[in-house]
Image (cartoon, coloured by chain):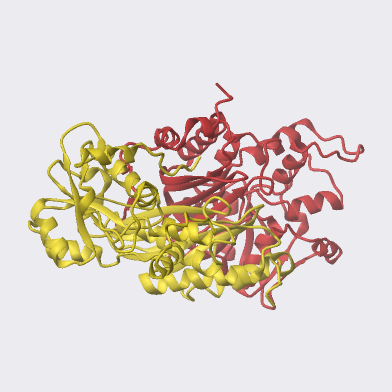
Chain colours: A red, B yellow
Amino acid sequence: MHKEILRDIGEKELINRLGKFMPKNQISDDCALIKTKNENLLINTDSLVENVHFNDITICPEDLGWKAVVSNISDLLSSGSKKTIGITISLVLPARTEWFWVESLYKGINKALKKYGGIILGGDCSKGEGKIISITAFGIQGELELRRNACKPGDIILTTGIHGLSKLGFLIQNKIHFDERFSLNKRLISKSIEHFCRPKIYPNFLNHLLKTRSNKKLKRIGCTDSSDGLFQALQDLAIASNCRAIINYDEIPKDKNWPKGEKWDEYYFFGGEDYELVFSLPKKWAKNLSKRIKNINEIGFFADGEPSIEFKDNKKNKLLENTPFKHF
Amino acid sequence: MHKEILRDIGEKELINRLGKFMPKNQISDDCALIKTKNENLLINTDSLVENVHFNDITICPEDLGWKAVVSNISDLLSSGSKKTIGITISLVLPARTEWFWVESLYKGINKALKKYGGIILGGDCSKGEGKIISITAFGIQGELELRRNACKPGDIILTTGIHGLSKLGFLIQNKIHFDERFSLNKRLISKSIEHFCRPKIYPNFLNHLLKTRSNKKLKRIGCTDSSDGLFQALQDLAIASNCRAIINYDEIPKDKNWPKGEKWDEYYFFGGEDYELVFSLPKKWAKNLSKRIKNINEIGFFADGEPSIEFKDNKKNKLLENTPFKHF
């Protein structure tokens, strides 16, 4: 059964089979349909390319499906989405691809949608040399506009969760050897693989923000996600908002088993694919939130000045000379 | 200048440059935003894959950009879109791709958007082995719901324009030789290349339908586009609507210079990429419309029975034994 490939299945039958993953109320037609109610729609598109973003060794198709959905919903959440409506899926697959692979991918996609909301609205499938999963996700803009350019000097910088774990998971899955002095803690290993293969996101983030808001007039919040790493997220916020990010190294939340050293700091700041939210709030709001929600931490503040990132402890600034993740 | 490639430009600069093609009011952020007003949204996703749907020999990047937009808007129109809001673009490009290529692609994209409406709402760009242009287009559902499953026995089948020209254009661009007995008419040659490289669509289609409607209670119309060929369009309508399509071969509109013969019938029925609209209407409405609009023709009718396609003239039925265009 596992060996049945797309070339043998044929296009019509493939479309039939994919249709079974979609809810029955969707029009099986040229277009998908969204019913809107005077609400603003957030849209996000992301592509995962084989041998660039994934390969069959590091991640199984079910996890890949999960991750493709989660990375898109993370972008919606980081813009202030209050509800995910659904996704369209554009697949490019070699004709030799096994049906089992496609089925597993869709299982992962539907598991993530079940967990975080939304349905499959439609999509298409084309033949190609390598696998590509391109997802467009739709959400409803909530009361707070979370935007990269809404950070203000004086704002506290906060982050959800812990960074670097996904990068470590990636290295472990790729069987990249570590210096033997670091005999990695077993819980850290399984946690890192989990973060890489089945990242979690924060569907209640907007509610937490609303519940801890110190002043109802505040409607715009500086925010992005750390899909390209914590450093890149901070840089994107600093550039879009035109201010200086000052980070307190000692306050950044690390896994208790995370080793010390330059290499490990590099994984932490430049790793990427953690899908944590990096954002800024006025002092009082930040205090309310970080006190109330366990896995949200203050890590620094924004100040007036040319867009840049620096550490409170100058000795740590050499960290920033590393090259961040590059797509090209 | 033409030799500047993406690897030398780098990701950040590439995103900057692509941003210049977008309207200034779009948020440069994790997500794109659509403001909705209690209207239903139509969504369509289509991918063009290098060496499957296009290559550098048959089509230049500017034409490719035009065509990528037009093929998506065609799907919106065939569902009854009254206005195109915009598109998101997901590009996969090898690092060796020249910037000139990307710039030309966007020129073509913006030319099509200028002609048919809509703006670039957002998108992303990833490295990959071959080029892929994946576009998601958004339109507003108009008063009439055009759907594949809305054809009824007794309805007249109509089509805009002429089929097969795009296929002929593709063959000419690929320098595929024709039997020497057919010395092709020069006007047919240039028209076919035009249809293949710069296909036109029907932004006024919905208005024409509304203006010629015989009964205001009629709200649902059977319709699809011929992006996969006239035969495939008829088959999709017949299957989705569960009825028999009976085609009058003598009524199908051909270019006056279109040669006769089985090969040419095959190009006509199975060619694809013409983006003509294939639809069905009650008799009176069909008459009103085809009389009023020059390039809309009646080509047959739907009847009760198992989903199928047949010709009024039985001798032509052997045509239908050919294999239609296959993606896998």
Count all numbered tags in the image, as a single digit.
0
Give the vertical position of B326 relative to A218 (above or below): above
Examine the image and state in which quarter residue B10 appears: bottom right
Front-lying residue, B288 or B96: B288
B84 vs A148, left or right, is: left
Image quarter (top left, top right, bottom left or bottom right) of the N terminus of chain B: bottom right
Give the vertical position of B216 relative to A84 (above or below): below
Percent x, y of residue B97: 67, 63
Front-lying residue, A297 or B84: B84
Q: Is residue B87 visible?
A: no
Give the vertical position of B79 relative to B9 (above or below): above
Percent x, y of residue A196: 67, 41
Percent x, y of residue B233: 32, 47
Q: Is residue B265 visible?
A: yes
A126 vs B273, left or right, is: right
Residue lying at 23% horizontally and 40% vertically, measured from the top left: B241
